[in-house]
Amino acid sequence: MRPLRGYPGGSEYQASRGKGHVTLPREIAQARQDALEHGPSAFVILFLTLVSARAHHILRLATALLAGPLDDRVAMAARTLPLVGDPRKARWLDSLAKVLVQEFGVRPRPTARELAERIGNHGPYAKAWSLGHGRILPAIVEPQMAPAPGAPRSWKLPGIACTGELAELLGLHADDLGWLTAYGQAEHYSHRWHAKAHGGWRLIESPKPLLKLAQRRVLERILGSIPPHEAARGFRPGTSIRDFVAPHVGKDVLIRFDLEDFFPSITSTRILRIFLTAGYPENVARALTRLTTHATPTEALADQSLPWAQRRRLATPHLPQGSPTSPALANLAAFTLDCRLARLAECCRAEYTRYADDLLFSGGEDFARGAERFRVKVAAILLEEGFLPNHRKTRVQRQGQRQHAAGLVLNEKPNIGRRDFDRLKAILTNCANFGPASQNRGEHEDFRAHLQGKLAWVGFIHPGKGEKLRAIFERIKWD
């Protein structure tokens, strides 16, 4: 007979081994007898209690292990020693640390539940638990930053160990941070539907003032220090639409892809991975994720008749289109996609750039001969990475055709399309002759600012054409 200690409530179970028989612990034996007399509920309740207690202890151990990096076996053992009591009964700890270093040492920080699942499957710990030596004591382990190995350790990010420090960094009261990060407690966004040019609806989700302030500070103080892939040319300082199209000018073939529902297709799970990779503790990473993602409420979805897939994407926590942090996070979430597509393009002697949901590939004669096969490979990679290609907008444009992307013609040099230039010139001329009200068919609230934006765009791409249009604009009489 030997005691099995460490079970809930400090109960002591007795078990004996003999030839052909096993003496069950007395509580389980009693539950078995009750089940035979009154039904299985008593046995089930005891079993669930034991399972729940084991899971609770494993989760406590996982939380302590995640308080620091998982690539230092000695440091991991040191963090967990206060939780195991007698080290002589925790001989499983060294083998567990070795396994975790091998599996997670070169990967981004996992969540506590992922690590707990691995600990639960660790044979030596399972054996120790069955012998009563797997009890994990309550203890406070201070979390620390643990960036993933490689480039993340060179990022100049502010250290944040808890949500209180996060609130301080963002200039918020702790109660305000809790209010902003509580899903379903309050609606912090306004919703506007815009009709797409080729049918369908786009939802613009704009954060309200307090949340927008917090998101801008997340962008400036955290996300601004995390570099996206070199192929990402949109929504990053120092780049423009010209940097997006410049590598593709004058090529034998240009292949253009468009991603459907780009922002809604990036879920909160991907965003959580970004902050965990940066090294933030799980509670801080989850708070940042909730600050920057949003699940569209049912009331807003009821305003339009949407396809089921689009409705589901919006109802799931996702990057809201209209948030200050969404473009930067979208670039980071597409990092693996950019790596794979850039490598594919390099192998095919092609160029690759991406501007938000627009993807461009271009190359010479060799690339042009395999353009159709290449298009299929890209579509497969997009699906594997969780993005949906919009096949209706996929274009393969050869040198003998009009090669255009992002509103520019790229056959010889980046230029404004003749049709777009002539249309804008006609609008300005009619405004000068008949007044601006006659041309405001889109009912813009500030039609003057709308035209000035178009003039700035033309002047940015082609200064000469911009000066000609500016001269016509100066003749317009504004009331």
Image: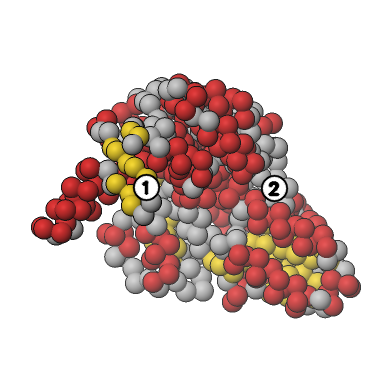
Residue ID at (45%, 43%)? 126
Q: Position of residue 458 (x, y in %)?
A: 68, 55
Q: Where is residue 69 in the image (x, y as percent from the top left)?
A: 59, 31
* Location of residue 135 with respect to 443 vertically, above or below: above
Question: Which residue occupies 50% across, 59% down?
Answer: 265
Residue 350 appears at what percent x and percent y?
Answer: 82, 63
Q: Does any portion of residue 343 appear in the rendered image?
A: yes
Please indicate whether residue 94 sits to the left or right of residue 418 in the image: left
Q: Choose the circle earlier in sequence order: 1 or 2.
A: 1
Q: Nearer the viewer, residue 247 or 260?
A: 260
Task: Out of 279 and 287, give the one closest to the viewer.
Answer: 279
Q: Which amino acid does label 1 sit on?
A: Gly
The part of the image, by quadrant, that contains residue 107 is: top right
> Taking 148 as reference, is 309 above or below it?
below
Q: Dot 1 corresponds to which residue?
A: 18
Residue 425 location in percent, x, y?
64, 64
> Which residue is under mark 2?
229
**Viewed as shown, does residue 278 lie left or right of 414?**
left
Element on which disc 2 rests: loop
